Each structure stands twice: as structure tokens, then as C-alpha cells.
Image (cartoon, grey):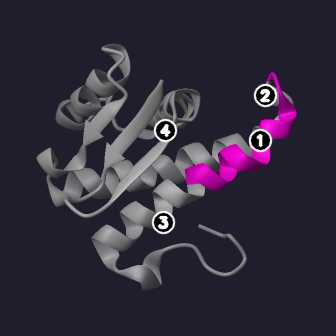
Amino acid sequence: MAGLIRISNEEAWSVAGWVFDHVLRQSVPFIPANNQRLLSVLKKGMVEGVGYIVLSVLSPSDKQIFLRALRGGLRHTEEVGSSAFAEPTFYPGFIDQFRELIDMLSSELNGPEESSDDNGEI
């Protein structure tokens, strides 16, 4: 299984299903509980096993909230480190894919200057 998040008509983030699921599981806790529209869109892509989310159905403010949630999820994942992975050798690639999604969404919302800097900081 694979997972895909359609960022725009021109751009999509496509990864292995386990990466898709784990990124969303790490990020959803950083979304305010009262943002039912965003949570519904994300959970539909997770729960139904579709592995497919289209961000164009979200408002720009919901996309910004999702971006902040992704950043929170990445920070949390980095704090926990590779020891939380059943196979720690997959951790660096997972982090790279997580950052790629953040960079893609950030570029879509704010332009390339708002994506990660040369040090990988978000």
C-alpha cells in the first residue's frame, strides 16, 4: 500500500503506506480538537485505508494548521528518536520523507523561502 497527499494540482507527496500512516499519527495530536473539518479530511484518508488526501478541499487557514501540526509531529518524532522504530535503520529515510511533506506544503502556502533551511531546521 502507498499513501498520497495531493498538495496542489501540480504536486503530490507519495510515500509507502506505513510512512503516510505514521506521519499522520504523529501530526494529528497537534491539530486543535475543534477543527473538525481538517480532522475529518485527514481521518478519512487514514481510517478508510484509502491512503489518499486532497488538500484543495481545505481552506488556507486549515492548511496552515496542518502545516503547524506536521512541524509539531516532526519535532516530537525527532525528540523520541529512532529507538521508537521497530527497525531503527528506517528512521533517517522516514525523517527525510516527513521533511519533504513539510517543505512541499510550506512552499505551496508561503513560497520556497518559508521551507526548511540548509541545516534541515523547520
| Image: 70 above or below 30 | below
Query: Which label's residue is closer to the chain start, 2 or 1?
Result: 2
Residue placed farthest to the top in the image? 48
Residue placed farthest to the bottom in the image? 113
Between disc 4 and disc 3, the foreground one is: 3
Q: Position of residue 69 (x, y in %)?
A: 44, 46
Image quarter of residue 3: top left
Which residue corresponds to mark 2? 85
What amino acid does circle 4 point to? Ser
Between disc 1 and disc 4, the foreground one is: 1
Between disc 4 and disc 2, the foreground one is: 2
Residues at marks 2 and 1, CA–CA distance in whole angstroms? 7 Å
Residue drawn at the location 13% of the way across and 45% of the way down: 57
What amino acid does circle 3 point to? Asp
Which residue corresponds to mark 3? 103
Residues at marks 3 and 2, CA–CA distance in whole angstroms? 23 Å
What amino acid does circle 1 point to? Tyr
Task: Name the one closer to the observer, 6 or 110.
Answer: 6
Which residue corresponds to mark 1? 91
Q: SS class of the residue under badge 2?
A: loop
Give the side of residue 6 with respect to residue 29, left or right.
Answer: left
Per the rendered image, the range of residues in magenta is 86-98
Image quarter of residue 11: bottom left
Which residue corresponds to mark 4? 27
Residues at marks 1 and 4, CA–CA distance in whole angstroms? 16 Å
